[in-house]
Each structure stands twice: as C-alpha cells, then as structure tokens.
Image: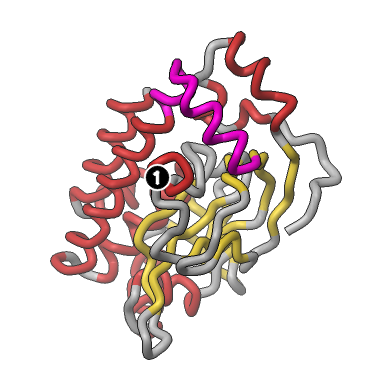
Amino acid sequence: MRVSSRHVDPRENRLLAALPDEEFDRLVPTFQQTSFSLGDVLYEFGGHLDYVYFPTTSIVSLLYTMENGATAEMGLTGNDGVVGIALFMGGETMPNRAVVQSAGDAVRMKAKVLQEEFKVGGQFQRLLLRYTQALITQISQTAVCNRLHSVEQQLCRWLLLSHDRVSTDELIMTQELIADMLGVRREGVTVAAGHLQDIGAISYVRGRIQILDRQKLEDTACECYRVVKDEFDRLLG
C-alpha cells in the first residue's frame, strides 16, 4: 500500500460521485490518494481501523479465515462502495480481513474525519447506510450461493461481480486464489473455468481472465448475481 503516483479521481468511486457538489467539495481536502498491489492487507481480523477506503480502480475482498487456515470470501468492494463500515456503524473493528483482490487505486479518509462527517448527516451519511444495506445483501446471498449452487455458478457470480467493479474486461487472478475466495477445491475451479472457456465466455491464460461474452456468464450464473445487482441498483442507482 502506498501513495499513488497517478492522479486518482475520487468521483471514479460511485458513492463519492453520487454526492451533491457542495458535500463533495467539502470532503475533497480530507481524501488521500493511495495505490494497492495484489494481496495488500487493508486490515486484519479484529484490528483497529485507522482509515476507510473508497476504491476507484481496485477491488477488495472481505475474507474470513478459519482456525485451520482455510479462507472464504464473504463479499467484495470496488468502485461501488467503501471498505471499513465498522467505523460508522459503531463497531470500531471488523470480524474479517480485507485483502486486495485486484490491484489499483483508491482514496482514503481518516477514521476520525469519517466519524465526524457521518454525524453531520446529509447525503454522505445516507449513501454510507444504503451501501451497508446493499453489502449485507451481498454477504447474505454469497452464503446462500456457496451452500446451494455449483462451483461453475459460483464462479460466474464472482466473475460478474468483479467485472462490474472494474473498467476493463481483464481480471488478473490465479485459479488458486479464486478457489480460496470461493472456499472450494482448486480442481473444481479448473473444471468450471475450462467449461466457461469451451463455451466462449472467458479466456484464461497464465492468471489473466478475459471476459469474452458477458451474456454467456449471466446465462450460466445462478439467480444470486441478479439479486445482489438489483439490490445495489435499487439502493444506490
């Protein structure tokens, strides 16, 4: 994690872009540009949160790690939202890890500044609460999907959610990391990815996944993706 050498436009984050100009202009001086590499850890389980992060071109996975070291993704955040909701929900710490799934940029805000702005109310507070409701839906639906649907359907859901949060058709991700995110065996991901390649939905070469036909992914995915997307659209537009 480092200060970004590129100019980061806060309005690339859809929550911040939805703010009225007056609120946005007031917040701009509180933003710090930052850049993430794949695998960067924003916070650990139970760790104290010093900042909240608004991704612009990066994606952050919310992971739970079991005592035996096994991991599974609870949810993911990209340019649709904010990482560190405990700071304005009153919890101070989070029950999971936040790990960068896709390298890129973000803007961050100091915890104390966020809490003060949240108390002011207004559209900023309203957007943060609506995003939290949408994230709860995503986490809940992920639990349902992981329990009831095939690895291929889970993979399609995950690819679509990731694709929605970046401005490119290419995702840099190994099958081993995807398996960790989904909480399944790598062999299952290999078979599922192979079938998606066979039908022309994706191309997978050396850790790079190219989305070739998004509609085929949507046709193959279970209803969980649509439930999550519809709720985000309803709450955040």
What residue did someone put label 1 on?
90
Query: Quick check: is 70 in the magenta stretch?
Result: no
Residue 183 position, x and y percent, is 34, 75
> Residue 143 sits in which quadrant?
bottom left
Name the kind of residue labelled 1 in the image.
Gly
Residue at point 17%, 60% (across, down): 144
Q: Which residues are magenta?
A: 110-127
Query: Quick check: is 115 in the magenta stretch?
Result: yes
> In this view, which residue lies farthest toward the bottom?
68
Point out the image quarter for the C terminus. Answer: top left
> Residue 135 sits in which quadrant?
top left
Residue at point 85%, 45% (across, down): 5
Residue 75 in the image: above or below residue 166: below
Residue 31 in the image: above or below residue 25: below
Residue 6 position, x and y percent, is 82, 41
From the image, give the main secondary structure of the stretch colored magenta: helix
| Horizontal side of residue 165 vs 90, given as left or right | right
Task: Tell me the crowding category of disc 1: few under 14, some 14 to 19, or many 20 or more residues within 10 angstroms, Cα based.
Answer: few
Residue 56 position, x and y percent, is 62, 39
